[in-house]
Image (tube, rainbow, N blue to C red):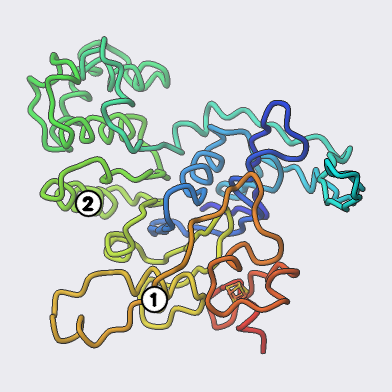
Amino acid sequence: LLEVKNLTKYFPVKGMKGPGVQAVENVSLFINKGETLGLVGESGCGKTTLGRTILRLHEPTSGQIIYDGKTIYQHEYPFDAQTVMEKDSEGQEHSRTVLVKKNVAKAKEVDMFPLRRKMQIIFQDPAASLDPRMTVGDIIGEAIDIHHLADSKAARTARIKELLGRVGLNTEHANRFPHEFSGGQQQRVGIARALAVEPEFIVCDEPISALDVSIQSQVVNMLEDMQAELGLTYLFIAHDISVVRHISNRIGVMYLGSLVELAESYELNKNPLHPYTQTLLSAVPVPDPEVSRTRQRIVLEGDIPSPMNPPTGCRFHTRCPYATDRCREETPAFLEHEPGHWAACHLLDK
Ligand code: SF4
């Protein structure tokens, strides 16, 4: 249903030379119709930016997005690496690599309006994503109005009631305002709004992170039921790998803007190839005290580097226990090492 090739998103920073915040770097992936692709990684790794860039809520910097066979964005390689010499405060000369914008083919622009119906998003913070001055009925009704999906007031009201019922809310909730609801109920409203336009593909951007643990499983179960009933396709973003492996058919792991591993959910858990994925999995609590006692926990040193100045070569090298000189200089390619199992690490070179 969706294919992304070498997708890159930089946020320029005023007064700063170079590309700015390098939030997403060269990500390639595909999502099959009806499946859930989970995306995990620690905060600030670019998962949300990737989800929003796929929907073109952020304009991509370069790469290609193909939805249902139609290219909805294409802009190849807008930057060229150049070496410049600079003097430091003591007059010493140093070389520095800067990225210079190249004059290449214009970005392919398509009218996103019809696609907005097919491609929706559920936001992380339900309270912030609902207009506090609108009733819940109008929040859902606005989506129906924009896409002209009801030909009468009665049909609109009936559709709002049906959507509220589908997400487990009462029909009389339509006249209430978002602040009158709990976090879990607000997220249900956000889901009803996404469903109002009959989408095919939904980016679930950390939909349960802001909710109580007791509510999280209800929302996850509801998303699974809706997928089975309506044939939806999800990109499910979360930082908790145990939730992602429960809901996802395949899982992608991101680190500092790059996709470092992608595989079937079962395969990734059984046979993680990338050192960062191994670290994430080793941090998942195991309920069995016997297993927990004997299991080796990998603890990373240091903090995640700044995406404004990411490390050269492999972006993980500053924290990787297996890093070599090659890792510091050469970016590992994202390769298929086993059928359906991709990873980017020099250790895996045959
Ligand atoms: Fe670690 Fe090197 Fe592999 Fe990167 S390429 S994950 S630094 S071993």
Of circles 2 and 1, which is in front? 1
Q: Position of residue 195 (x, y in %)?
A: 31, 35
Q: Label 2's element?
A: helix
What amino acid is at disc 2?
Val
Quote the CA–CA distance across marks 2 and 1. Answer: 29 Å
- Front one among 292 and 332: 292
Q: Quadrant of ligand 1?
A: bottom right
Residue at x 36%, y 30% (from the top left corner): 197
State the mark number for residue 298: 1
- Front one among 346 and 129: 346
Q: Label 1's element?
A: loop
The quadrant in which residue 147 appears is top left
Q: Position of residue 13 (x, y in %)?
A: 67, 31
Is disc 1's CB within 8 Å of ligand 1?
no
Residue 234 placement, left or right of 14? left
| Residue 85 shows up from this direction | yes
Graded by Cα atoms within 10 Å as few (under 14), some (14 to 19) or many (20 or more), the crowding at tag 2 reads: some
Could you tell which of marks 2 and 1 lies nearer the N-terminus?
2
Residue 100 placement, left or right of 264? right
Q: Position of residue 257 (x, y in %)?
A: 57, 53
State the mark number for residue 220: 2
What amino acid is at disc 1?
Ile
- Front one among 77 and 345: 345
